């Protein structure tokens, strides 16, 4: 993996720096120390062409303002706080009224997205350090901790770890705007989306949650089966009208061990699989985006050009006791993750992540394979593919055991790393054995 840093400008005496990392799988990520904002994310499409799949500004100094929160870290409380106030342990807390003049959005005017983080390099990425006082964001307690950006195969891992000296509420997310056909390449209405959620959180005017958790069945919010985002986007449901004609709502995820979301670009063939240990995910179809300067000079972004999948706690957790709690006590560690696995349809890489794993081979049966792969027999190409699979798995397993000795990996992450790479290696061997059996069977049938 290659990593480097570039100084962009000095903003009010503070350096604005760009950090970039890229790996051998053709994935490249760049972010700024201001807001930890992801400003480019290149992945190979189905033809192997590098494609930038997130929004951003051509002028990187614009990220110091960044009204749409392009790619930014959002906290300490993402989403909306009704009437900019809440109570915790009998203490009445008031927050910044930066939304419609009476509510709080994404932590208020001073939040994670305009904070200048300290950044240091690690073996497989970067760690951002932050400290947030009540004087900075108006929230109770001094919140301190880290956000890590790492690359593993074709996966971007984002892990948040924070502690507090006083009871507070914490709900952190990352806010990249995705267009898997490539930013500037049309809208996302034909993207296919699956959400692992049977229920959504109901909201009223101003998109403030009302505490109800409702079934998606029979509503335009049902993405339990993958379909085009634009299929029902003009539905007159009041929540969609309130959102500006589109989606802007939180879903209650079903299972932490399954993908939270799968998004596929209709033109590029790029598929993104999202994993998280958060209870919810906010779907936002950039309904309010209008004439926002783009990466290419002279171009602007507009409505439906992007989709956001923001993993987070339920908005309103500070009010509704039946919601999963966003409370953080002294001595506890806020430990949450957001993982995006991106790959072209021609290559789906096995991946292990925090409390989650998935193994996908994407191997078709013999009759469906392209002619160049051969109908029968054990070709050199197949042998190389299987050898590469087993070799990569062996290397990753060796690295995992080295990390055990160094004490540099959490046990739950290690467990899934070992499981997924063993699965990957065994799958490769089974693939080879199956090929030989089928080849022999067809050969015997020809006599």
Image (cartoon, helix red, strand yellow):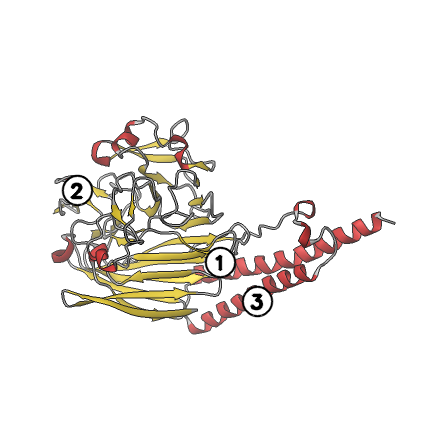
- Label 3 – label 1 distance at C-alpha: 15 Å
Residue 28 x, y percent position in the rendering: 41, 61
Q: Earlier in the sequence, mark 3 or mark 1?
A: 3
- The circle drawn on residue 394 is 3
Say which of marks 2 and 1 sits in front.
Answer: 2
**Secondary element at image label 1:** helix
Marks 2/1 in contact by CB < 8 Å: the verdict is no
From the viewer's perspective, is residue 193 above or below residue 183?
Answer: above
Q: Residue furthest front?
A: 298
Give the mark nearer the N terminus: 2 vs 3: 2
Q: Secondary structure at mark 3?
A: helix
**Marks 2/3: CA distance?**
51 Å
Residue at 17% in and 56% down: 141
138 or 295, which is in the foreground?
Answer: 295
- The residue that mark 2 highlights is 99
Q: From the viewer's perspective, is residue 417 above or below residue 230?
A: below
Q: Reply above or below: 114 against 225.
A: below
Q: Residues within 10 Å of mark 2 (few under 14, many from 20)?
A: some
Is residue 444 left or right of 363 when viewed as pictured?
right
Does residue 147 appear in the picture of this structure?
Answer: no
Label 2 and label 1: CA atoms lie apart by: 41 Å
Report the front residue among 160 and 365. 365
Q: Which mark is on residue 416? A: 1
Q: Position of residue 442 (x, y in %)?
A: 79, 49
Q: Is residue 316 left or right of residue 362?
A: left
In front: mark 3 or mark 1? 3
Snapshot quadrant of residue 37: bottom left
- To which quarter of the image does residue 236 belong? top left
- Give yes or no for contact between labels 2 and 3 (Cβ–Cβ under 8 Å): no
């Amino acid at each position: 993996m290659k990593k480097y840093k570039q100084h962009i400008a000095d903003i009010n005496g503070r350096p604005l720096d760009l950090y970039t990392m890229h790996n051998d799988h053709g994935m490249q990520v760049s972010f700024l120390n201001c807001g930890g904002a992801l400003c480019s994310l290149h992945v190979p499409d189905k033809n192997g062409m590098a494609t930038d799949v997130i929004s951003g500004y051509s002028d990187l100094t614009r990220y110091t303002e960044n009204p749409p929160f392009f790619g930014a870290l959002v906290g300490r409380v993402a989403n909306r706080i009704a009437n900019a106030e809440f109570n915790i342990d009998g203490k009445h807390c008031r927050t910044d009224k930066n939304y419609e003049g009476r509510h709080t959005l994404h932590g208020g005017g001073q939040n994670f997205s305009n904070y200048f983080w300290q950044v240091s390099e690690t073996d497989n990425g970067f760690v951002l350090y932050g400290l947030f006082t009540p004087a900075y964001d108006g929230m109770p307690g001094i919140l301190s901790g880290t956000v890590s950006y790492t690359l593993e195969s074709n996966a971007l891992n984002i892990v948040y770890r924070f502690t507090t000296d006083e009871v507070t509420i914490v709900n952190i997310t990352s806010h990249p705007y995705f267009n898997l056909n490539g930013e500037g390449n049309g809208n996302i209405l034909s993207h296919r989306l699956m959400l692992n959620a049977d229920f959504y959180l109901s909201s009223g005017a101003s998109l403030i949650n009302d505490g109800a958790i409702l079934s998606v069945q029979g509503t335009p919010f049902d993405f339990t089966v993958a379909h085009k985002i634009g299929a029902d986007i003009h539905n007159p449901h009041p929540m969609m009208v309130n959102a500006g004609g589109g989606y802007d709502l939180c879903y209650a995820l079903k299972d932490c061990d399954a993908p939270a979301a799968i998004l596929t670009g209709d033109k590029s063939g790029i598929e993104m699989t999202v994993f998280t240990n958060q209870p919810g995910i906010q779907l936002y179809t950039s309904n309010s985006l209008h004439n926002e300067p783009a990466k290419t000079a002279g171009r602007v972004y507009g409505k439906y050009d992007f989709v956001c999948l923001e993993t987070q706690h339920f908005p309103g957790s500070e009010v509704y006791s039946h919601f999963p709690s966003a409370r953080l006590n002294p001595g506890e560690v806020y430990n949450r993750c957001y993982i995006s696995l991106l790959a072209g349809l021609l290559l789906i890489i096995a991946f292990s992540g925090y409390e989650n794993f998935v193994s996908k081979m994407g191997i078709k049966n013999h009759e469906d394979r392209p002619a160049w792969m051969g109908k029968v027999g054990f070709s050199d190409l197949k042998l190389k593919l299987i050898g590469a699979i087993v070799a990569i798995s062996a290397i990753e397993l060796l690295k995992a055991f080295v990390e055990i000795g160094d004490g540099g990996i959490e046990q739950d992450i290690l467990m899934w790393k070992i499981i997924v790479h063993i699965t990957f290696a065994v799958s490769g061997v089974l693939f080879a054995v199956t090929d030989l059996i089928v080849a022999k069977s067809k050969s015997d049938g020809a006599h």
